[in-house]
Image (cartoon, rainbow, N blue to C red):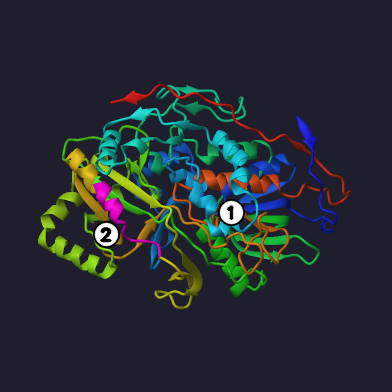
Protein backbone atom coordinates (compact mmCIF):
# COMPACT_ATOMS: atom_id res chain seq x y z
CA UNK A 1 0.00 0.00 0.00
CA UNK A 2 1.27 3.50 -0.83
CA UNK A 3 0.32 6.88 0.53
CA UNK A 4 1.19 10.36 -0.71
CA UNK A 5 4.46 11.79 0.51
CA UNK A 6 4.50 14.65 2.97
CA UNK A 7 4.83 18.14 1.58
CA UNK A 8 8.17 18.61 -0.18
CA UNK A 9 10.56 21.52 0.40
CA UNK A 10 9.70 24.54 -1.71
CA UNK A 11 13.19 24.87 -3.22
CA UNK A 12 14.94 21.52 -3.67
CA UNK A 13 18.66 21.60 -4.41
CA UNK A 14 19.26 22.15 -8.12
CA UNK A 15 22.12 19.61 -8.40
CA UNK A 16 20.81 16.43 -10.08
CA UNK A 17 24.09 14.50 -9.75
CA UNK A 18 23.41 13.09 -6.31
CA UNK A 19 24.33 9.48 -5.51
CA UNK A 20 21.56 9.34 -2.90
CA UNK A 21 18.82 11.47 -1.43
CA UNK A 22 20.05 10.73 2.09
CA UNK A 23 23.33 9.41 3.46
CA UNK A 24 22.99 7.87 6.92
CA UNK A 25 26.22 7.55 8.90
CA UNK A 26 26.10 4.67 11.38
CA UNK A 27 23.82 1.66 11.76
CA UNK A 28 22.96 1.65 15.47
CA UNK A 29 19.49 2.42 16.80
CA UNK A 30 19.29 5.92 15.31
CA UNK A 31 20.81 4.99 11.96
CA UNK A 32 18.81 1.79 11.50
CA UNK A 33 15.51 3.53 12.17
CA UNK A 34 16.44 6.39 9.84
CA UNK A 35 17.46 4.03 7.05
CA UNK A 36 14.20 2.08 7.15
CA UNK A 37 11.76 4.94 7.61
CA UNK A 38 13.37 7.24 5.04
CA UNK A 39 13.51 4.40 2.52
CA UNK A 40 9.82 3.73 3.12
CA UNK A 41 9.20 7.44 2.53
CA UNK A 42 10.67 7.15 -0.95
CA UNK A 43 14.19 8.45 -0.32
CA UNK A 44 17.17 6.80 -1.97
CA UNK A 45 19.20 5.92 1.13
CA UNK A 46 22.86 4.93 1.41
CA UNK A 47 23.96 3.87 4.90
CA UNK A 48 27.68 4.06 5.68
CA UNK A 49 28.93 1.90 8.55
CA UNK A 50 32.51 1.97 9.83
CA UNK A 51 32.44 -1.62 11.09
CA UNK A 52 32.08 -4.91 9.29
CA UNK A 53 28.96 -6.96 8.70
CA UNK A 54 28.90 -9.76 11.27
CA UNK A 55 27.11 -12.93 10.24
CA UNK A 56 26.22 -15.75 12.61
CA UNK A 57 29.50 -17.56 11.89
CA UNK A 58 31.46 -14.42 12.83
CA UNK A 59 29.58 -14.11 16.12
CA UNK A 60 30.19 -17.76 16.94
CA UNK A 61 33.90 -17.38 16.17
CA UNK A 62 34.07 -14.42 18.56
CA UNK A 63 33.23 -16.76 21.43
CA UNK A 64 36.52 -18.59 20.85
CA UNK A 65 38.78 -15.98 19.27
CA UNK A 66 39.47 -12.59 20.93
CA UNK A 67 40.60 -11.27 17.53
CA UNK A 68 37.05 -11.68 16.27
CA UNK A 69 35.54 -10.15 19.43
CA UNK A 70 37.69 -7.20 20.52
CA UNK A 71 38.02 -4.00 18.51
CA UNK A 72 41.52 -2.66 19.17
CA UNK A 73 42.78 -1.62 15.72
CA UNK A 74 46.10 -0.43 17.11
CA UNK A 75 46.79 -4.00 18.25
CA UNK A 76 45.47 -5.58 15.07
CA UNK A 77 42.17 -6.67 16.63
CA UNK A 78 39.18 -5.95 14.39
CA UNK A 79 36.22 -7.41 16.24
CA UNK A 80 33.03 -5.66 17.27
CA UNK A 81 33.38 -4.95 21.03
CA UNK A 82 35.27 -1.79 21.96
CA UNK A 83 36.15 0.14 25.08
CA UNK A 84 37.48 3.71 25.18
CA UNK A 85 39.03 5.08 28.34
CA UNK A 86 38.91 8.83 29.02
CA UNK A 87 40.16 10.70 32.07
CA UNK A 88 36.79 10.63 33.81
CA UNK A 89 34.80 7.87 32.15
CA UNK A 90 35.24 4.57 30.31
CA UNK A 91 32.76 3.85 27.54
CA UNK A 92 31.97 0.42 26.05
CA UNK A 93 30.02 -0.34 22.91
CA UNK A 94 29.78 -2.23 19.63
CA UNK A 95 30.83 -1.53 16.08
CA UNK A 96 29.60 -3.20 12.91
CA UNK A 97 26.35 -3.41 10.98
CA UNK A 98 23.83 -3.19 13.81
CA UNK A 99 25.99 -0.95 15.98
CA UNK A 100 25.44 -1.22 19.71
CA UNK A 101 22.61 -3.72 19.25
CA UNK A 102 25.23 -6.41 18.61
CA UNK A 103 26.49 -6.25 22.22
CA UNK A 104 23.17 -5.07 23.69
CA UNK A 105 21.34 -7.04 26.39
CA UNK A 106 17.97 -6.27 24.76
CA UNK A 107 16.43 -4.35 27.67
CA UNK A 108 13.59 -2.03 26.60
CA UNK A 109 12.70 0.26 29.50
CA UNK A 110 10.81 3.55 29.13
CA UNK A 111 12.12 6.77 30.68
CA UNK A 112 10.54 7.98 33.91
CA UNK A 113 9.13 11.28 35.10
CA UNK A 114 12.55 12.70 35.98
CA UNK A 115 13.55 12.55 32.33
CA UNK A 116 10.50 14.46 31.09
CA UNK A 117 10.84 17.05 33.88
CA UNK A 118 14.54 17.70 33.19
CA UNK A 119 15.30 21.30 32.27
CA UNK A 120 17.18 20.42 29.10
CA UNK A 121 14.16 18.62 27.67
CA UNK A 122 11.31 20.65 29.14
CA UNK A 123 12.58 23.97 27.79
CA UNK A 124 12.32 22.72 24.20
CA UNK A 125 8.57 23.26 24.35
CA UNK A 126 6.58 20.14 23.39
CA UNK A 127 4.89 17.91 25.93
CA UNK A 128 7.55 15.28 25.48
CA UNK A 129 5.66 12.55 27.29
CA UNK A 130 2.75 12.92 24.86
CA UNK A 131 5.13 13.57 21.96
CA UNK A 132 7.14 10.38 22.45
CA UNK A 133 4.33 8.05 23.53
CA UNK A 134 3.31 6.79 20.05
CA UNK A 135 6.92 6.42 18.99
CA UNK A 136 7.85 4.49 22.13
CA UNK A 137 4.99 2.13 21.33
CA UNK A 138 6.07 1.78 17.70
CA UNK A 139 9.71 1.22 18.67
CA UNK A 140 8.73 -1.41 21.24
CA UNK A 141 6.75 -3.28 18.60
CA UNK A 142 9.52 -3.12 16.01
CA UNK A 143 12.05 -4.41 18.54
CA UNK A 144 9.72 -7.21 19.65
CA UNK A 145 9.33 -6.18 23.28
CA UNK A 146 8.06 -8.91 25.62
CA UNK A 147 8.29 -9.39 29.40
CA UNK A 148 11.00 -11.86 30.30
CA UNK A 149 9.43 -15.27 30.97
CA UNK A 150 12.58 -16.65 32.61
CA UNK A 151 13.31 -16.69 36.34
CA UNK A 152 16.30 -18.53 37.72
CA UNK A 153 18.61 -18.55 40.76
CA UNK A 154 20.22 -15.23 39.80
CA UNK A 155 16.81 -13.58 39.77
CA UNK A 156 15.97 -15.10 43.15
CA UNK A 157 19.18 -13.66 44.60
CA UNK A 158 18.30 -10.23 43.18
CA UNK A 159 14.87 -10.50 44.82
CA UNK A 160 16.60 -11.28 48.12
CA UNK A 161 18.79 -8.20 47.68
CA UNK A 162 15.72 -6.08 46.96
CA UNK A 163 14.07 -7.44 50.10
CA UNK A 164 17.20 -6.71 52.16
CA UNK A 165 17.19 -3.01 51.16
CA UNK A 166 13.42 -2.64 51.63
CA UNK A 167 12.51 -2.53 47.94
CA UNK A 168 10.88 -5.93 47.36
CA UNK A 169 7.69 -4.31 46.03
CA UNK A 170 9.62 -2.79 43.11
CA UNK A 171 11.16 -6.09 41.95
CA UNK A 172 9.99 -7.68 38.71
CA UNK A 173 10.88 -9.08 35.29
CA UNK A 174 12.21 -6.71 32.63
CA UNK A 175 10.87 -6.12 29.10
CA UNK A 176 13.23 -7.60 26.52
CA UNK A 177 13.84 -7.54 22.76
CA UNK A 178 14.15 -11.31 22.48
CA UNK A 179 12.18 -13.92 20.55
CA UNK A 180 11.50 -16.65 23.10
CA UNK A 181 9.24 -18.85 20.99
CA UNK A 182 10.10 -22.53 21.41
CA UNK A 183 13.63 -22.99 22.71
CA UNK A 184 16.02 -23.70 19.83
CA UNK A 185 13.23 -24.09 17.25
CA UNK A 186 13.49 -22.11 14.01
CA UNK A 187 10.31 -20.76 12.46
CA UNK A 188 9.27 -18.29 9.76
CA UNK A 189 9.29 -14.58 10.61
CA UNK A 190 6.84 -14.10 13.51
CA UNK A 191 7.01 -10.29 13.60
CA UNK A 192 6.53 -8.70 10.17
CA UNK A 193 4.15 -10.95 8.26
CA UNK A 194 6.93 -12.75 6.43
CA UNK A 195 8.93 -9.61 5.59
CA UNK A 196 11.51 -10.36 8.27
CA UNK A 197 14.05 -13.21 8.57
CA UNK A 198 13.46 -16.62 10.13
CA UNK A 199 13.78 -16.64 13.92
CA UNK A 200 14.83 -19.22 16.49
CA UNK A 201 13.51 -19.46 20.03
CA UNK A 202 15.93 -18.27 22.75
CA UNK A 203 18.35 -20.97 23.94
CA UNK A 204 18.77 -19.21 27.32
CA UNK A 205 22.55 -19.36 26.88
CA UNK A 206 23.34 -16.07 28.67
CA UNK A 207 25.47 -14.86 25.74
CA UNK A 208 23.46 -11.81 24.61
CA UNK A 209 26.39 -9.42 25.13
CA UNK A 210 28.50 -11.39 22.65
CA UNK A 211 26.02 -10.90 19.84
CA UNK A 212 23.35 -13.54 19.24
CA UNK A 213 24.24 -16.00 16.45
CA UNK A 214 21.16 -18.13 17.11
CA UNK A 215 18.41 -15.89 15.72
CA UNK A 216 16.77 -15.07 19.07
CA UNK A 217 17.85 -11.55 20.10
CA UNK A 218 16.08 -8.82 18.16
CA UNK A 219 19.23 -6.95 17.20
CA UNK A 220 18.83 -4.40 14.43
CA UNK A 221 19.97 -6.72 11.65
CA UNK A 222 16.77 -8.73 12.23
CA UNK A 223 14.29 -5.85 12.04
CA UNK A 224 15.04 -2.27 10.97
CA UNK A 225 18.17 -2.98 8.92
CA UNK A 226 16.84 -6.16 7.36
CA UNK A 227 13.69 -4.36 6.24
CA UNK A 228 15.59 -1.26 5.08
CA UNK A 229 17.70 -3.38 2.73
CA UNK A 230 14.66 -5.34 1.60
CA UNK A 231 12.96 -2.10 0.61
CA UNK A 232 15.94 -0.67 -1.25
CA UNK A 233 18.40 0.98 1.15
CA UNK A 234 22.05 0.31 0.38
CA UNK A 235 24.26 -0.58 3.37
CA UNK A 236 28.00 -0.18 2.86
CA UNK A 237 30.03 -1.79 5.67
CA UNK A 238 33.63 -0.80 6.39
CA UNK A 239 33.09 2.75 5.15
CA UNK A 240 34.47 5.16 7.73
CA UNK A 241 33.33 8.74 7.14
CA UNK A 242 36.21 11.23 7.31
CA UNK A 243 34.60 14.43 6.02
CA UNK A 244 31.22 16.04 5.39
CA UNK A 245 31.33 19.12 3.17
CA UNK A 246 28.44 21.25 1.86
CA UNK A 247 28.12 21.44 -1.94
CA UNK A 248 27.87 24.86 -3.60
CA UNK A 249 24.41 24.22 -5.04
CA UNK A 250 23.02 22.52 -1.94
CA UNK A 251 23.44 19.06 -0.48
CA UNK A 252 26.59 17.45 0.91
CA UNK A 253 29.67 15.55 -0.15
CA UNK A 254 30.59 12.70 2.20
CA UNK A 255 34.12 11.32 1.98
CA UNK A 256 34.94 7.84 3.28
CA UNK A 257 37.89 5.50 3.70
CA UNK A 258 38.26 1.82 4.54
CA UNK A 259 39.02 1.63 8.29
CA UNK A 260 41.97 -0.71 7.59
CA UNK A 261 43.27 1.16 4.56
CA UNK A 262 42.07 -1.36 2.00
CA UNK A 263 41.54 0.33 -1.31
CA UNK A 264 40.91 3.96 -2.19
CA UNK A 265 38.41 6.15 -0.40
CA UNK A 266 35.04 7.02 -1.85
CA UNK A 267 32.87 10.10 -2.16
CA UNK A 268 29.08 10.02 -1.88
CA UNK A 269 26.95 13.06 -2.76
CA UNK A 270 23.51 13.44 -1.20
CA UNK A 271 20.84 16.05 -0.64
CA UNK A 272 20.83 15.40 3.09
CA UNK A 273 22.98 13.64 5.69
CA UNK A 274 21.91 11.96 8.93
CA UNK A 275 24.63 11.42 11.54
CA UNK A 276 23.99 8.41 13.75
CA UNK A 277 27.48 7.15 14.54
CA UNK A 278 26.93 7.02 18.30
CA UNK A 279 27.99 9.74 20.71
CA UNK A 280 31.73 9.26 20.27
CA UNK A 281 31.61 8.76 16.51
CA UNK A 282 29.26 11.66 15.86
CA UNK A 283 31.17 14.09 18.09
CA UNK A 284 34.54 13.12 16.67
CA UNK A 285 33.33 13.64 13.09
CA UNK A 286 31.65 16.98 13.81
CA UNK A 287 34.69 18.27 15.71
CA UNK A 288 37.06 17.33 12.90
CA UNK A 289 34.80 18.85 10.23
CA UNK A 290 34.47 22.09 12.20
CA UNK A 291 37.90 22.53 13.77
CA UNK A 292 40.38 20.66 11.54
CA UNK A 293 38.87 20.54 8.04
CA UNK A 294 36.77 23.70 8.29
CA UNK A 295 34.02 22.05 6.25
CA UNK A 296 31.24 22.61 8.83
CA UNK A 297 32.23 25.96 10.37
CA UNK A 298 28.79 26.86 11.71
CA UNK A 299 28.44 23.91 14.10
CA UNK A 300 27.51 25.27 17.53
CA UNK A 301 30.07 26.02 20.23
CA UNK A 302 27.93 23.71 22.38
CA UNK A 303 29.38 20.70 20.55
CA UNK A 304 30.79 18.29 23.13
CA UNK A 305 28.96 19.90 26.06
CA UNK A 306 26.32 18.20 28.24
CA UNK A 307 27.71 14.68 27.91
CA UNK A 308 26.12 12.35 30.43
CA UNK A 309 26.23 8.78 31.59
CA UNK A 310 23.33 7.16 33.39
CA UNK A 311 25.15 7.93 36.66
CA UNK A 312 25.91 4.24 36.87
CA UNK A 313 28.17 1.82 38.68
CA UNK A 314 29.06 -1.74 37.71
CA UNK A 315 29.61 -4.20 40.54
CA UNK A 316 29.79 -7.99 40.63
CA UNK A 317 29.38 -11.10 42.74
CA UNK A 318 31.35 -14.32 42.15
CA UNK A 319 29.62 -17.45 43.40
CA UNK A 320 31.46 -20.37 45.05
CA UNK A 321 32.88 -23.13 42.81
CA UNK A 322 30.32 -25.48 41.30
CA UNK A 323 27.50 -22.97 41.04
CA UNK A 324 26.03 -22.04 37.66
CA UNK A 325 23.74 -19.01 37.34
CA UNK A 326 24.17 -18.59 33.59
CA UNK A 327 20.96 -20.03 32.16
CA UNK A 328 18.70 -17.28 30.82
CA UNK A 329 19.02 -14.08 28.80
CA UNK A 330 21.67 -11.66 30.02
CA UNK A 331 19.21 -9.47 31.97
CA UNK A 332 15.88 -10.74 33.27
CA UNK A 333 14.92 -8.78 36.40
CA UNK A 334 15.32 -5.43 38.12
CA UNK A 335 14.23 -3.32 41.08
CA UNK A 336 14.40 0.24 42.41
CA UNK A 337 16.16 0.61 45.80
CA UNK A 338 14.97 4.23 45.94
CA UNK A 339 13.06 6.69 43.80
CA UNK A 340 16.12 7.67 41.75
CA UNK A 341 17.95 4.35 41.42
CA UNK A 342 17.51 1.34 39.14
CA UNK A 343 19.33 -2.02 39.46
CA UNK A 344 19.54 -4.91 36.99
CA UNK A 345 21.44 -8.20 37.10
CA UNK A 346 23.59 -9.42 34.20
CA UNK A 347 24.70 -12.86 33.12
CA UNK A 348 27.99 -12.46 31.29
CA UNK A 349 28.80 -15.71 29.52
CA UNK A 350 31.74 -14.78 27.31
CA UNK A 351 32.90 -12.02 29.65
CA UNK A 352 36.29 -13.63 30.14
CA UNK A 353 37.97 -10.22 30.11
CA UNK A 354 36.22 -9.38 33.40
CA UNK A 355 38.67 -11.67 35.23
CA UNK A 356 41.33 -8.98 35.25
CA UNK A 357 38.95 -6.07 35.80
CA UNK A 358 37.42 -7.09 39.14
CA UNK A 359 38.83 -6.57 42.62
CA UNK A 360 37.69 -6.26 46.23
CA UNK A 361 34.60 -4.22 47.06
CA UNK A 362 35.71 -0.95 48.65
CA UNK A 363 33.62 2.05 49.70
CA UNK A 364 34.70 5.68 49.57
CA UNK A 365 33.40 8.84 47.97
CA UNK A 366 36.87 10.35 47.51
CA UNK A 367 38.55 8.60 44.55
CA UNK A 368 42.11 9.04 45.84
CA UNK A 369 41.42 7.56 49.25
CA UNK A 370 39.37 4.77 47.73
CA UNK A 371 42.26 3.87 45.43
CA UNK A 372 44.68 3.69 48.39
CA UNK A 373 42.30 1.47 50.35
CA UNK A 374 41.90 -0.78 47.33
CA UNK A 375 45.67 -1.12 46.96
CA UNK A 376 45.94 -1.97 50.65
CA UNK A 377 43.29 -4.68 50.27
CA UNK A 378 45.05 -6.13 47.24
CA UNK A 379 48.42 -6.11 49.02
CA UNK A 380 47.02 -7.77 52.14
CA UNK A 381 45.13 -10.47 50.24
CA UNK A 382 46.91 -11.30 46.96
CA UNK A 383 45.79 -14.93 47.03
CA UNK A 384 42.14 -13.90 47.26
CA UNK A 385 42.59 -11.71 44.18
CA UNK A 386 44.38 -14.53 42.36
CA UNK A 387 41.48 -16.87 43.11
CA UNK A 388 39.14 -14.44 41.38
CA UNK A 389 41.36 -14.03 38.34
CA UNK A 390 41.95 -17.79 37.92
CA UNK A 391 38.54 -19.05 39.03
CA UNK A 392 37.21 -22.10 37.21
CA UNK A 393 33.80 -21.64 35.68
CA UNK A 394 34.26 -17.89 36.18
CA UNK A 395 31.68 -16.72 33.64
CA UNK A 396 28.96 -19.09 34.84
CA UNK A 397 29.53 -18.14 38.47
CA UNK A 398 29.58 -14.39 37.81
CA UNK A 399 26.74 -11.90 38.30
CA UNK A 400 27.32 -8.31 37.17
CA UNK A 401 25.00 -5.71 38.71
CA UNK A 402 24.28 -2.45 36.89
CA UNK A 403 23.11 0.39 39.15
CA UNK A 404 21.85 3.53 37.37
CA UNK A 405 20.55 6.79 38.82
CA UNK A 406 18.51 9.74 37.60
CA UNK A 407 20.86 12.07 39.49
CA UNK A 408 22.22 14.48 36.90
CA UNK A 409 25.88 14.76 35.98
CA UNK A 410 27.80 16.31 33.13
CA UNK A 411 31.10 16.05 31.37
CA UNK A 412 32.42 17.75 28.27
CA UNK A 413 34.25 16.03 25.44
CA UNK A 414 36.71 18.18 23.52
CA UNK A 415 39.08 17.61 20.61
CA UNK A 416 42.54 18.16 22.11
CA UNK A 417 46.04 16.83 21.67
CA UNK A 418 46.53 13.25 22.75
CA UNK A 419 48.85 12.85 25.77
CA UNK A 420 50.29 9.70 24.15
CA UNK A 421 50.40 10.90 20.52
CA UNK A 422 50.77 14.69 20.71
CA UNK A 423 50.84 15.00 16.91
CA UNK A 424 47.18 13.93 16.84
CA UNK A 425 44.06 15.42 18.41
CA UNK A 426 41.57 13.09 20.05
CA UNK A 427 38.43 13.36 22.14
CA UNK A 428 39.26 14.06 25.78
CA UNK A 429 36.97 14.50 28.77
CA UNK A 430 36.66 17.50 31.08
CA UNK A 431 34.50 18.06 34.16
CA UNK A 432 32.08 20.96 33.77
CA UNK A 433 29.29 22.22 36.00
CA UNK A 434 27.53 20.10 38.58
CA UNK A 435 28.49 16.57 39.55
CA UNK A 436 30.85 14.55 37.41
CA UNK A 437 29.93 11.04 36.33
CA UNK A 438 30.28 9.06 39.57
CA UNK A 439 32.86 6.35 40.06
CA UNK A 440 31.18 5.18 43.27
CA UNK A 441 27.54 4.80 44.21
CA UNK A 442 27.13 3.73 47.85
CA UNK A 443 23.74 2.19 47.07
CA UNK A 444 25.38 -0.03 44.43
CA UNK A 445 27.75 -1.50 47.00
CA UNK A 446 24.89 -1.98 49.49
CA UNK A 447 22.87 -3.90 46.93
CA UNK A 448 25.91 -5.94 45.90
CA UNK A 449 26.67 -6.85 49.51
CA UNK A 450 23.05 -7.92 50.00
CA UNK A 451 23.16 -10.05 46.83
CA UNK A 452 26.41 -11.66 47.98
CA UNK A 453 25.00 -12.42 51.42
CA UNK A 454 21.87 -14.00 49.94
CA UNK A 455 23.80 -16.11 47.41
CA UNK A 456 26.95 -16.95 49.36
CA UNK A 457 29.15 -15.20 46.80
CA UNK A 458 31.99 -12.69 46.99
CA UNK A 459 31.17 -9.00 46.31
CA UNK A 460 33.48 -7.21 43.87
CA UNK A 461 34.08 -3.78 42.34
CA UNK A 462 35.58 -2.84 38.98
CA UNK A 463 39.23 -1.91 39.43
CA UNK A 464 38.75 0.89 36.92
CA UNK A 465 36.32 2.48 39.35
CA UNK A 466 38.19 1.83 42.59
CA UNK A 467 41.75 2.41 41.35
CA UNK A 468 41.18 4.72 38.41
CA UNK A 469 38.25 6.77 39.66
CA UNK A 470 36.45 6.05 36.38
CA UNK A 471 32.75 5.83 35.74
CA UNK A 472 32.24 2.86 33.40
CA UNK A 473 29.23 3.06 31.11
CA UNK A 474 27.59 1.54 28.06
CA UNK A 475 25.06 4.38 28.12
CA UNK A 476 26.82 7.59 27.13
CA UNK A 477 24.41 10.36 26.08
CA UNK A 478 24.56 13.93 24.80
CA UNK A 479 27.28 16.09 23.30
CA UNK A 480 25.19 17.28 20.35
CA UNK A 481 22.05 17.99 22.34
CA UNK A 482 18.78 19.50 21.21
CA UNK A 483 18.27 23.18 22.02
CA UNK A 484 16.10 26.12 21.04
CA UNK A 485 19.07 27.96 19.52
CA UNK A 486 22.72 27.34 18.74
CA UNK A 487 23.52 28.94 22.10
CA UNK A 488 21.72 26.07 23.85
CA UNK A 489 22.42 23.07 21.65
CA UNK A 490 23.82 21.65 18.43
CA UNK A 491 20.52 20.58 16.84
CA UNK A 492 16.94 21.82 17.00
CA UNK A 493 13.93 19.79 18.14
CA UNK A 494 13.73 18.27 14.64
CA UNK A 495 17.38 17.13 14.93
CA UNK A 496 18.68 19.54 12.25
CA UNK A 497 22.15 20.98 12.91
CA UNK A 498 22.06 24.73 13.52
CA UNK A 499 23.84 26.57 10.71
CA UNK A 500 23.89 23.61 8.30
CA UNK A 501 20.48 22.93 6.71
CA UNK A 502 20.00 19.35 5.58
CA UNK A 503 22.46 17.95 8.13
CA UNK A 504 20.87 16.04 11.02
CA UNK A 505 21.86 14.04 14.11
CA UNK A 506 19.69 11.08 15.13
CA UNK A 507 21.48 9.14 17.85
CA UNK A 508 22.01 9.32 21.63
CA UNK A 509 24.12 12.47 21.33
CA UNK A 510 20.96 14.62 20.92
CA UNK A 511 19.47 13.56 24.28
CA UNK A 512 19.66 16.56 26.64
CA UNK A 513 18.81 14.84 29.95
CA UNK A 514 19.74 11.83 32.05
CA UNK A 515 17.53 8.77 31.45
CA UNK A 516 18.46 6.64 34.46
CA UNK A 517 17.49 3.46 32.55
CA UNK A 518 18.86 1.55 29.58
CA UNK A 519 18.48 4.06 26.72
CA UNK A 520 17.96 1.90 23.62
CA UNK A 521 14.16 2.20 23.51
CA UNK A 522 14.29 5.99 23.97
CA UNK A 523 16.93 6.41 21.25
CA UNK A 524 14.80 4.30 18.90
CA UNK A 525 11.65 6.28 19.70
CA UNK A 526 13.41 9.62 19.17
CA UNK A 527 14.67 8.35 15.81
CA UNK A 528 11.14 7.25 14.87
CA UNK A 529 9.89 10.74 15.71
CA UNK A 530 12.74 12.32 13.75
CA UNK A 531 12.04 10.21 10.65
CA UNK A 532 8.30 10.96 10.81
CA UNK A 533 9.09 14.69 10.65
CA UNK A 534 11.77 14.43 7.96
CA UNK A 535 11.17 16.36 4.69
CA UNK A 536 9.60 14.34 1.89
CA UNK A 537 11.73 13.36 -1.11
CA UNK A 538 11.55 15.27 -4.36
CA UNK A 539 12.64 14.20 -7.82
CA UNK A 540 15.12 16.97 -8.54
CA UNK A 541 14.70 16.76 -12.30
CA UNK A 542 10.92 17.14 -12.34
CA UNK A 543 10.01 18.45 -8.90
CA UNK A 544 7.36 15.73 -8.63
CA UNK A 545 6.62 14.27 -5.22
CA UNK A 546 7.19 10.52 -4.93
CA UNK A 547 4.87 7.92 -3.49
CA UNK A 548 5.94 6.15 -0.36
CA UNK A 549 5.46 2.82 1.36
CA UNK A 550 3.27 2.79 4.44
CA UNK A 551 5.57 2.40 7.49
CA UNK A 552 5.75 -1.22 8.53
CA UNK A 553 4.83 -2.10 12.10
CA UNK A 554 5.24 -5.34 13.99
CA UNK A 555 2.48 -7.57 15.19
CA UNK A 556 2.47 -8.70 18.84
CA UNK A 557 4.18 -12.00 19.60
CA UNK A 558 3.26 -13.86 22.79
CA UNK A 559 5.97 -15.15 25.11
CA UNK A 560 6.12 -18.65 26.46
CA UNK A 561 5.00 -19.16 30.05
CA UNK A 562 7.32 -18.22 32.93
CA UNK A 563 10.17 -20.66 33.33
CA UNK A 564 11.46 -21.14 36.86
CA UNK A 565 14.55 -23.17 37.63
The numbered dot on residue 276 is: 1
Q: Nearer the viewer, residue 366 or 360?
A: 366
Q: x and y percent of residue 29 in the render?
A: 55, 46
User: What's the distance in space between the residues labelled 2 and 1, CA to CA?
Assistant: 32 Å
Q: Nearer the viewer, residue 160 or 167?
A: 167
Q: x and y percent of residue 496 in the render?
A: 68, 58
Local secondary structure at mark 2: helix
- Residue 274 lies within the magenta run: no
Furthest residue to the bottom?
422
Q: Residues within 10 Å of mark 1 (few under 14, many from 20)?
A: many
Local secondary structure at mark 1: loop
Q: From which residue to which does the magenta span run?
A: 436-448
- Residue 439 lies within the magenta run: yes
Residue, x 87% and y 45% (percent of image)? 544
Rendered position, 198 above or below 109: above
The numbered dot on residue 463 is: 2
On the question of residue 330 being in view, the answer is no
Amino acid sequence: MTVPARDAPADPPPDAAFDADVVVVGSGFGGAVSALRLTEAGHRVVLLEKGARQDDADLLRARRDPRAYLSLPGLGLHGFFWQRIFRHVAVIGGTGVGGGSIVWAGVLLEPGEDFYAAEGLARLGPDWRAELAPYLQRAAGMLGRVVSPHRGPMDEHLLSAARAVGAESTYGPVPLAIHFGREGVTEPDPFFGGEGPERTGCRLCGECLLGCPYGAKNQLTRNYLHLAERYGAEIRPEHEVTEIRPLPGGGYQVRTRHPRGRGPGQVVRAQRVVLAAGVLGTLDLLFRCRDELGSLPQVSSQLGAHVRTNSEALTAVLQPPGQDLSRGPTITSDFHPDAHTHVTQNRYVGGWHMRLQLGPMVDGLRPGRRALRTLARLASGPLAQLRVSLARGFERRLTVLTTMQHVDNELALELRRSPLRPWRRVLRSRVTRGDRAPSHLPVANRVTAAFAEASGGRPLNLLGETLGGLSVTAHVLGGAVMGRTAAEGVVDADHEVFGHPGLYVADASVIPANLGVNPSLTITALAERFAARFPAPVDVSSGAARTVREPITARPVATSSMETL
